[in-house]
Amino acid sequence: MPEMIVCFKEVVDERELKVNPKTQELMTEGITRKISDFDLNAIEEAIRIKEMHGGRATGVIVGLPECKPSIKKALSMGLDRACLLSDPAFAGSDTLTVAAILAAAIRKLGPFDMILCGEASTDGFSAQLGPSLAERLDLPQITAASQVTIEGNQVVAERSLDDGIEVVEASFPVLLSVTKEINKPRLATLKQILAASKKEVLEWKAADLGLSTDAVGLQGSPIVLKRVAAFRMERKNIRLEGTLAEAAERAIRELLREGVL
Ligand SMILES: Cc1cc2nc3c(=O)[nH]c(=O)nc-3n(C[C@H](O)[C@H](O)[C@H](O)COP(=O)(O)OP(=O)(O)OC[C@H]3O[C@@H](n4cnc5c(N)ncnc54)[C@H](O)[C@@H]3O)c2cc1C
């Protein structure tokens, strides 16, 4: 009966993002927040494993106190409990530091068999957190898993590569990051949504994890974000006139000239 940890992140809904035309900065105020897409797959996979093999799944999130609706959603889907790691001192933490915070919390939660992460977050999209966490906890890691099977205390996973599928296995304890293809996240029923309010949510700050405030946040983060620039796309506004055949010929000529074909 595997003891599972699921790391999930709350992100802004990228479909609502706008760029301030003057400063080129992202305008995130008032935007809907949600669980990062691949993390829904990680949550779903933990629930499926629990349904087949029993065990327990604990969600862990480094986020703002306002991320409680996302925690409730994860619990409604079927996680057994959650752990919110939130502290003003965490602001400005880079990937390495977020991994250090998660590692400290996972150690504090006690023995586990599997950690499930998304392959990458839908905002930062560095895909570094899972591998970084595995290194900190000295675990074998299987990244980009598109299918997972548990056999005793062994995990067998398929990894989708550009040129084929790789099948790998590892013994517990192990960290997996999962792709979107692994499953279709479920929608919680009304009964599950109501039951989620009664599930345990632990809340820990830096001090609870034995982390000094110098080791987290901006001070503890070696990555310095210098500038955020928006990608600008200028249209050439070339009009293809004439018959369909003439327009097609001109389109091909232009694409060849641009080196696209
Ligand atoms: C200098 C700097 C300052 C930053 N300041 C802030 C800040 O003030 N506030 C802020 O929110 N972000 C901040 N970030 C971004 C933050 O560091 C990253 O979002 C985080 O480290 C995860 O990286 P990622 O989004 O690329 O995740 P990836 O590595 O792409 O994520 C892979 C998987 O890791 C897990 N995961 C990722 N993030 C979390 C999380 N927070 N909790 C639980 N599981 C997670 C999920 O399973 C996810 O699918 C900052 C980054 C930098 C470089």
Image (spheres, rainbow, N blue to C red):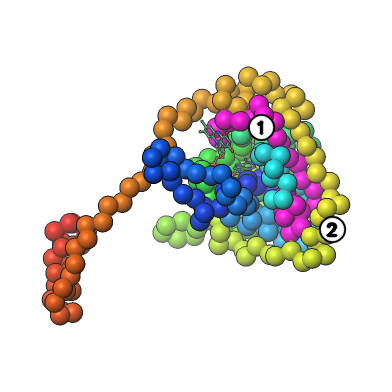
- Badge 2 element: helix
Amino acid type at circle 2 is: Ala
1 or 2: tag closer to the N-terminus: 1
Would residue 242 be counted in the magenta stretch?
no
Residue drawn 42% across and 29% down? 226
Q: Which residue is mark 2?
A: 195
The disc at residue 101 is 1
Residue 109 locus on image (x, y percent):
78, 37
225 shown above or below 46: above
Q: Which residue occupies the extreme front position in the image? A: 22
- Badge 1 element: helix
Q: Quick one: quadrant of the C terminus?
A: bottom left
Would residue 82 be counted in the magenta stretch?
yes
Amino acid type at circle 1 is: Ile
Residues rendered magenta in the picture: 71-96
Residue 146 locus on image (x, y percent):
56, 59
Question: In front: mark 1 or mark 2?
Answer: 2
Residues packed near mark 2 inside 10 Å, few (<14), some (14 to 19) or many (20 plus): some
The disc at residue 161 is none
